[in-house]
Amino acid sequence: MGDTGRAPPAVRTGTRQEPTPMPRLALYALVVCALAVAAAVVSFVQGSFLGIVWVLLAGLSSNMAWYYIRRAKAGA
């Protein structure tokens, strides 16, 4: 009901688990995904159907980022 002034057990014992950093390949895949989405928007605004290719590339790169993040979590 109120703050007891005590830290949670994980903090008291010093066994706090730090989050693992994002793998470099996953970060690159997320950057490619964001750039592909931006290119698709620009392409569709200009009236070109080439944006479909950019949407497919964004989907592929997002799946790659998801894969590399999951693989890093499983390995940790």
Image (cartoon, grey):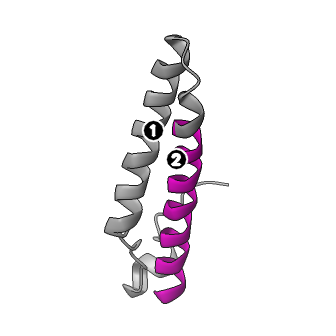
Is 6 placed left or right of 14 in the picture? right
| Picture layout, residue 35 above or below residue 74 | above
Q: Residue at x 51, y 37 (%)?
A: 54
| Residue nearest the viewer, comparing 64 with 44 | 44
- The 10 Å Cα crowd at callout 2, few under 14, some 14 to 19, many 20 or more, is some
- The 10 Å Cα crowd at callout 1, few under 14, some 14 to 19, many 20 or more, is many
Element at label 1: helix
Percent x, y of residue 69: 49, 69
N-term mark: 1 or 2: 1
Is 1 placed left or right of 16 in the picture? right
Query: Which residue in the structure is indicated by mark 1?
Result: 36
Q: Residue at x 52, y 47 (%)?
A: 57
| Residue nearest the viewer, comparing 29 with 10 | 29
Q: Residue at x 31, y 67 (%)?
A: 24
Q: Is residue 6 visible?
A: yes
Q: Is residue 3 magenta?
A: no
Element at label 2: helix
Percent x, y of residue 68: 48, 71
Q: Is residue 4 visible?
A: no
User: How far apart are labels 1 and 2 at the CA level?
Assistant: 6 Å
| Residue nearest the viewer, comparing 14 with 35 | 35
The segment highlighted magenta reads: 54-76
Query: Which residue in the structure is indicated by mark 2?
Result: 57
Residue 53 lies in quadrant: top right
Label pair 1/2, CB-CB below 8 angstroms: yes
